[in-house]
Amino acid sequence: MIMTLSLSIIIFIISNFFIFLSLTISKKSLLDREKCSPFECGFDPKSIPRIPFSLHFFLITIIFLIFDVEIALIFPMIPSFSMVNFFTWWKVSSFFIIMLLLGLYHEWNQNMLNWTN
């Protein structure tokens, strides 16, 4: 019990020493307001907060999230190949990929993937 208590005190002292050392050695200053401010998608945090938001940037972000989630759903299809018969696996995976391609075609047809707009 005494050994555990003494080790806990030693660890506490060493960790506090390193925290104090890092705070004194660090090169942060209060004059660096840009480094301390949050960075949000290329916006200047010191400017007016109600500037017009690019709808195209928002759509690209939503498209990325949708494709990211769909890829996360495709990964479990690979191990399930050995658990079900081929025809069932082929129907489910081809339907899923066809829906993904139809969504991509619709986004391409609506010019959501062009940055020139």
Image (tube, rainbow, N blue to C red):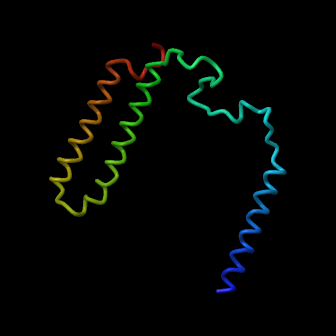
Above or below, comparing residue 52 to residue 63 in the picture: above
Above or below, comparing residue 57 to residue 37 in the picture: above
Front residue of this view, candidates 115 and 82: 115
Front residue of this view, candidates 52 and 98: 52
Question: How many discs appear?
Answer: 0
Relative horizontal placement of residue 85, taking residue 8 as reference (left or right): left
Q: Hey, which residue is sitting farthest right in the picture?
A: 25
Residue 4 occupies quadrant: bottom right
Q: Residue at x 54, y 15 (%)?
A: 51
Q: Residue 48 placed where, x, y %?
A: 59, 17
Q: Residue at x 24, y 36 (%)?
A: 99
The quarter of the picture where the N terminus appears is bottom right
Q: Residue at x 71, y 34 (%)?
A: 35
The quarter of the picture where the C terminus appears is top left
Relative horizontal placement of residue 86, taking residue 19 as reference (left or right): left
Relative horizontal placement of residue 65, taking residue 51 as reference (left or right): left
Residue 98 occupies quadrant: top left
Relative horizontal placement of residue 114, taking residue 102 as reference (left or right): right
Q: Hey, which residue is sitting farthest top in the picture?
A: 117
Q: Residue 5 placed where, x, y %?
A: 68, 80
Q: Residue at x 77, y 33 (%)?
A: 32
Q: Residue 33 placed where, x, y %?
A: 73, 31
Front residue of this view, candidates 31 and 87: 31
Q: Residue 21 placed where, x, y %?
A: 82, 57
